[in-house]
Amino acid sequence: MKRVLLAAALAGLASPSPAAEAAPKLSLEQKTLLRCSAAFAIIASEQARGVESALAYPPLGERGKEYFVQAGARLIGELKLTHEQVDGLYRAEIKRLQDESATSDDPRALVTSIMQPCLLSLDASGI
């Protein structure tokens, strides 16, 4: 199931599932896990495709994936969600980040603005 969640995120699936539409209330820490997981999935996917701007970040193929998986497990446990519901939350967040970036004057600005705190979160996680 972990690979299914990751594959969906890395594929950048744009349509949120019905589970994401009834999103639960998230704490600030849970929102950070979700947002950073989505940012790492986007950057890891771009790194795998050789996108130059993404290559400026540390490689996220392994550590970013592990953060994504552990964050998902934590959200499932803390919020009593199903894998499908967490998958829907990831899809919705990835889509939101992609949509906001696409409508910005600087498409990289949003992801760039959240990557520094997310990289700190990744380092603090011990992964």
Image (cartoon, rainbow, N blue to C red):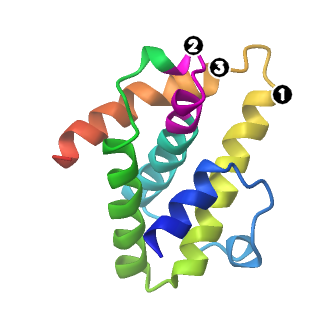
Depth-wise, is mark 1 or mark 2 nearer the camera? 2
Image coordinates of residue 13 in percent, x first then y, are: 73, 55
Q: Is residue 10 above or below residue 103?
A: below
Extreme residue toward the left, this view: 126
Amino acid at the residue labelled 1: Thr
Image coordinates of residue 67 in percent, x first then y, are: 34, 52
In this picture, residue 27 sits left or right of residue 70: right
Q: Nearer the viewer, residue 22 or 85?
A: 85
Is residue 78 part of the magenta span, yes or no? no
Q: Residue at x 52, y 44 (%)?
A: 41
Q: CA distance from mark 3 to mark 2?
A: 12 Å
Residue labelled with disc 1: 103
In this picture, residue 125 sits left or right of residue 37: left
Q: Which residues are magenta?
A: 43-54
Q: Is residue 59 above or below residue 106?
A: below
In this picture, residue 56 sits left or right of residue 111: left
Q: Residue at x 53, y 32 (%)?
A: 48
Q: Residue at x 53, y 21 (%)?
A: 54
Residue labelled with disc 3: 108
Q: Is residue 123 above or below residue 92?
A: above
In terms of sequence position, does the residue under pointer 1 or pointer 2 come before the other? 2
Circle 1 residues within 10 Å: few <14, some 14–19, many ≥20:
few
Whether label 1 touches label 2, CB < 8 Å: no
In terms of sequence position, does the residue under pointer 1 or pointer 3 come before the other? 1
Amino acid at the residue labelled 2: Glu
Q: Secondary structure at mark 1?
A: loop
Amino acid at the residue labelled 3: Arg
Residue labelled with disc 2: 52
Image coordinates of residue 121 in percent, x first then y, are: 29, 40
